[in-house]
Every structure is written in structure tokens, then in C-alpha cells.
Amino acid sequence: MITKIEIVTGFSCNNNCKFCSVRRRNFDKKTEDIKKDIDRAIKENPKEINFTGGEPTIRKDILELIKYTNERKMKEIRVTTNGRMFSYKDFTNKIVEAGLTGAIFSIHGHKAELHDYLTNVKRSFDQAIKGLKNLREFTEDIDVNTVINSENYKILPELVEMLIDKFNIRAICLIFPTIDGNLLDNLNLVPSYSQVVDSLRKAIDVIKERKKIGWTLNMPICFFEGYELYSSMGELKTKMFWPDQETNLDEKRKEDKVKLAVCSKCKYSLVCSGVPKDYIKIKGEKGIKPVEGSAVKEYDYISSEG
């Protein structure tokens, strides 16, 4: 069952993140094509429609698109955003008035120096944080995506603590990068799973202590023994409308992974889809070890025991 539909509005962006996986940076959908996407999405009766990119908030028609969606009685309307446009109070007021109910901000560092280095834009951190504060005046429905990389994995606990304690962020998704686009020119930013796992677990501990929602993406469950509920095992129940195709993200995640020889000896083998192919191509199989124990046959078991 699909509960969320993400509409990719195009790939233009006012950031130029070093880890961005997008290749077609100069493509954007036409307004009428996005309205067709909205109509098609609503027919599937999702709980939420989310506009993503690129950076959807820099589109001249974004208020029109939000209003169009709102007029069709969609209750949850969100954008995935770098947050910079929300630093303008007038824009925030107008997009909320048009019908926006929440947002997913992309925050990649706990301080301006780190975040701005990763986004390649000075003051992008200050604008994102100001945007968080502005939107927070209207809604508590604000989540954060953080892309894990070699420059920020050590400070993930501090970043999560800041986001929750200062801004009461509802949910945080910690994403191991997709190795494509700009990241192909910055492979030094790709850490190994073994490098990040300790810091990542500490970040999850902060999320657990604060009783917030959190999860990871693009890392195999063998690195999350004891933290299974925060692994990538849960269903996303999300469909994405790309410029030229639509994708069920749960099916896509399985297609993008491969089972290694050691996976057959792991207790999670029956419920795990394997390791992302792009990771193996760049980093190899080193550090990926099977977890001993009785075979886990269903994800529901992990949920009930976690």
C-alpha cells in the first residue's frame, strides 16, 4: 500500500552539494506536467504528497502547485528542501497560506563551516536554520534528512542533538549517499560502513533518548544488530514520480542491492536485500560480516523484538 507520493519537480537547485547524486541539473518539469502528476497522485489516495527535486522552492510556480494540491483536498502537503527560501519570512507566509503543511529540511552539519563546505554555498547553513525557525512558527511537521559522509559522520550525535533540542525536529533520516552525480568527483567523501557505524549508533541513541522518530537509509542491517528498528528494513510505502517514469521505492531499493557470499551465513539473510551495488563497486566487500544467530524469517519479528 502506497501512503506517500513524491513528485520530482525537476533538478535545478540553488545549492551544489558535493555529494549530490543528480546528473541532470538543468532539467525542470513544466507546470502543467506537474499538475498532471498531482492529479494522478491523488487518484492513488496517498496520505501525503511531497514535492522534491532538485530544489522545488526556487520554482516560480511553487505557490501555484501547492495551492493546486490543497484545492484537491490533500491533507498533507510537504516539500523536501534545503530550507534557504524559508529564510524569507514573506515566502514562508505565502507557501503556508497556499496549503503547505510541513517540510523535510536537508541539514548536513552542526555548524555553518561544515554545512556550507558540503553544499558549496556560503551562508546556506544560516539560511536553512533561519528557515527552520520561520516554518516552525506555523507547524511542528518538520523532519530532517542528513547525508552521511566522510566529513560529517563523526559529528552525527551532535547534529541530531542540536536538531532535536533546539528545533524539536519530529523525525531524522540519516542517509548513506548514493554514489552518482557530483559524488563521483568527490569519492573521498564516501566513508565505509565500518567507519560510520559507531557514531551512527550514538546518533540513534540520542533519537531514542529524546523519544523521536529516526531511521537510516542505504546501509545493510548487519551493521544494526540491536538497532534493527532504525535500519533500512522498514517499508517506505512511497512512490516517486520522476520526469520519465514512476518508481516504487521499496522495489527500487531491492533492485539496487546485491547479496554477497557472506550474506548466506547471516541471521538476517532472509529479510535483508543485501548491499547497495554502488557501494560494493567503490568500497568493496571489506568489513561486511555476517551476524551469527538464529535466522530471522520476518521483519515483523524484528519489530516486535526490537
Image (cartoon, rainbow, N blue to C red):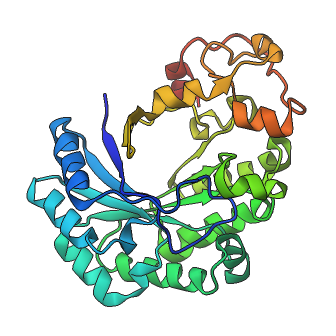
Image quarter (top left, top right, bottom left or bottom right) of the C terminus: top right
* Left or right of 26, for residue 198: right
Image x and y of residue 36, in percent: 19, 48
- Where is residue 275 drawn, in percent x and y? 71, 29
Q: Nearer the viewer, residue 267 or 62?
A: 62
Q: Quadrant of residue 170?
A: bottom left
Residue 281 spot, x, y in % from top left: 79, 34
Q: Is residue 109 left or right of residue 126?
A: right
What residue do we see at 44% from left, 58% from top? Answer: 27
Residue 142 seen in the figure = no
Is 41 above or below relative to 206? Answer: above
| Residue drawn at point x = 67 percent, y = 78 percent | 116
Q: Does residue 81 appear to the left or right of 118 in the view shown?
A: left
Horizontal and vertical percent for residue 185? Answer: 77, 57
Asked whether the viewer can see residue 196, the reply is yes
Given residues 101 and 85, the one toward you in this image is: 85
Q: In the picture, which quadrant includes the N terminus?
A: top left
Up the image or down, 177 lies above or below 126; here it is: above
